[in-house]
Image (cartoon, grey):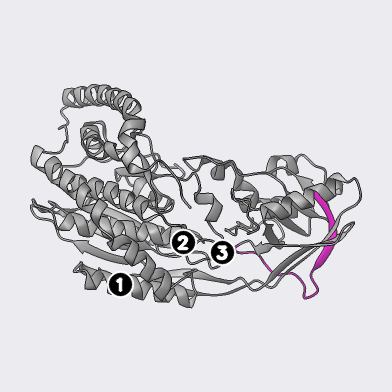
């Protein structure tokens, strides 16, 4: 289960820290607002009426069971939604129909072309010195092996730089095993450090003549389940098959390697690529009032991996966005800006929907986006509020934080990149808000067969919806106009 401090204890445990962080943030905000005023920029902050409504909204969200019910529905009625699959198409239809039934306006499904990779079957076993079968999943995008599989000696490395330090004769004709472990962190940074082996490992190994790779699962679970995820083949290197084994199996493999005896393994993969197919972004809106031409975007990615049900990654994110928008729509005063909910297509296999969205909108409509935010790190709880907004807008972030700090939410910085699907918008200057979901236990289940509804804590999901709802509502209520953020032409997500 995703764990964390229960809501009732948060004010006591985090009071001192919250006050210190808030005072520090207020100092930053005062300095930023003073500088902005000197430059002629208008400070953007919530009105007293909006803050009062936001507090009511927070409390309503904490009492609502809608998000959990909707998450149960999509996991039951649709299940896994890997890009290009029947589940992907069913997910698009489900979200379109749900937004329509909930009264969202202008519901639409603009087409997105996505890859269609079929997992097939995968096996990995130690042939010698001590035969053992291991729990395995093919890495997303992997090619298949010959029908009889590949049998070869193993060479162990910790990560890609360690592999690149080897000579070709140490790797050629072998299967490379990446042994690097994923550190458990609250902000997900441990995953970011470990994932290079999965993404770059196959081509780095193939460049040195390897015939395949196997990785320790990029996850923190000690259960005997393997984690999938995508790889990136370098066009300049041969394509070789790639699998992941569970952490307990990786430990066993390392004990055999430590015996000093030669270790031979066999891997077999039947994965294959099929022609690209049509999917879609799913979009619905809550129209604004006097600032209806401006947009507050909130979303998650609708696709998922296939071993589990796509509940935490990222069904929860889509449902959080939908529930937050619906709750905000029912408040008085009504949201001034239009709130737009989006379920992005194919985040897992290359951000297809994220890139297609601003291309469909065009620069003129992208410029209408006042703020954007994304939920893509499980069902919660939210533990920190960060942003990337112009200095004059920092008082807005402080207003949001004052409303949700009693839920255990810390105040972050003004340097966040937001979610991966927001990258193309961010590079065009759209300000981002980032309620950060707690990733401490997220990578126990992420990309595994264990991504199921049973791993969701309803109370923590409610807290996440509450924080996103307040963020969406106050962003929609703030005075304008909203400035653009500074952009770097070659900035990475």
The alpha-carbon separation of the residues under discs 3 and 2 comes to 12 Å
Q: 89 or 102: nearer the eye?
A: 102
Rendered residue at 67%/72% (across/down):
121
Rendered residue at 15%/32% (across/down):
42
The alpha-carbon separation of the residues under discs 2 and 1 comes to 25 Å
Q: Is the residue under label 1 in contact with that under label 3 (CB below 8 Å)?
A: no
Rendered residue at 33%/47% (across/down):
428
Q: If you read the primary sequence from the N terminus, does the residue marked by circle 3 or circle 2 appear first?
A: 3
Residue 166 on image: x %, y %: 80, 42
Which mark, by number, is residue 456?
A: none
Please give the range of residues in magenta: 140-155
Give the labeled residue for mark 3.
449
Which mark, by number, is residue 454?
A: 2
| Count of numbered labels shown in the rendering | 3
Relative to 152, 372 lies left or right? left
Which mark, by number, is residue 96?
A: 1
Rendered residue at 24%/26% (across/down):
29
């Amino acid at each position: 289960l995703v764990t964390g401090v229960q809501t009732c204890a948060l004010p006591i445990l985090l009071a001192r820290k919250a006050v210190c962080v808030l005072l520090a943030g207020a100092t930053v905000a005062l300095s930023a607002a003073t500088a902005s005023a000197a430059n002629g920029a208008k400070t953007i902050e919530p009105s007293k009426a909006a803050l009062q409504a936001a507090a009511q909204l927070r409390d309503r969200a904490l009492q609502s069971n809608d998000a959990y019910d909707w998450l149960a529905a999509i996991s039951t009625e649709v299940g896994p939604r890997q890009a290009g699959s029947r589940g992907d198409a069913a997910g698009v239809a489900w979200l379109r129909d749900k937004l329509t039934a909930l009264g969202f306006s202008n519901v639409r499904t603009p087409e997105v072309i996505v890859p269609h990779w079929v997992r097939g079957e995968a096996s990995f076993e130690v042939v010698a010195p001590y035969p053992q079968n291991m729990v395995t999943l093919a890495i997303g995008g992997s090619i298949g092996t010959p029908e009889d599989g590949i049998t070869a000696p193993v060479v162990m490395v910790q990560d890609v730089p360690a592999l690149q330090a080897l000579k070709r004769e140490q790797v050629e004709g072998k299967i490379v095993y990446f042994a690097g472990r994923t550190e458990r962190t609250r902000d997900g940074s441990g995953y970011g450090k470990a994932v290079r082996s999965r993404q770059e490992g196959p081509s780095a190994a193939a460049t040195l003549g390897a015939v395949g790779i196997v990785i320790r699962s990029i996850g923190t679970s000690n259960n005997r389940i393997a984690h999938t995820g995508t790889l990136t083949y370098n066009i300049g290197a041969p394509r070789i098959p790639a699998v992941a084994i569970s952490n307990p199996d990786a430990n066993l493999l390392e004990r055999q390697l430590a015996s000093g005896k030669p270790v031979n393994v066999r891997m077999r993969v039947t994965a294959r690529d099929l022609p690209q197919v049509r999917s879609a972004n799913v979009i619905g809106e809550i129209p604004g009032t006097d600032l209806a031409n401006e947009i507050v975007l909130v979303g998650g990615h609708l696709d998922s991996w296939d071993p589990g049900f796509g509940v935490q990654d990222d069904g929860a994110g889509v449902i959080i966005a939908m529930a937050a928008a619906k709750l905000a729509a029912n408040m008085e005063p009504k949201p001034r800006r239009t709130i737009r909910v989006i379920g992005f297509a194919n985040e897992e296999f290359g951000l297809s929907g994220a890139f297609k969205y601003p291309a469909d909108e065009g620069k003129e409509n992208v410029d209408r986006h006042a703020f954007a935010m994304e939920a893509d790190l499980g069902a919660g709880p939210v533990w920190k509020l960060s942003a990337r907004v112009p200095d004059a807008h920092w008082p807005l972030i402080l207003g949001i934080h004052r409303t949700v700090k009693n839920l255990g939410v810390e105040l972050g910085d003004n340097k966040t990149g937001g979610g991966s699907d927001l990258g193309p918008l961010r590079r065009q200057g759209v300000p981002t808000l980032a309620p950060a979901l707690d990733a401490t236990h997220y990578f126990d289940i992420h990309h595994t067969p264990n991504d199921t509804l049973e791993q969701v804590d309803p109370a923590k999901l409610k807290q996440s919806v509450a924080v996103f709802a307040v963020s969406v509502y106050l962003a929609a209520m703030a005075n304008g106009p909203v400035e653009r953020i500074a952009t770097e032409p070659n900035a990475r997500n």
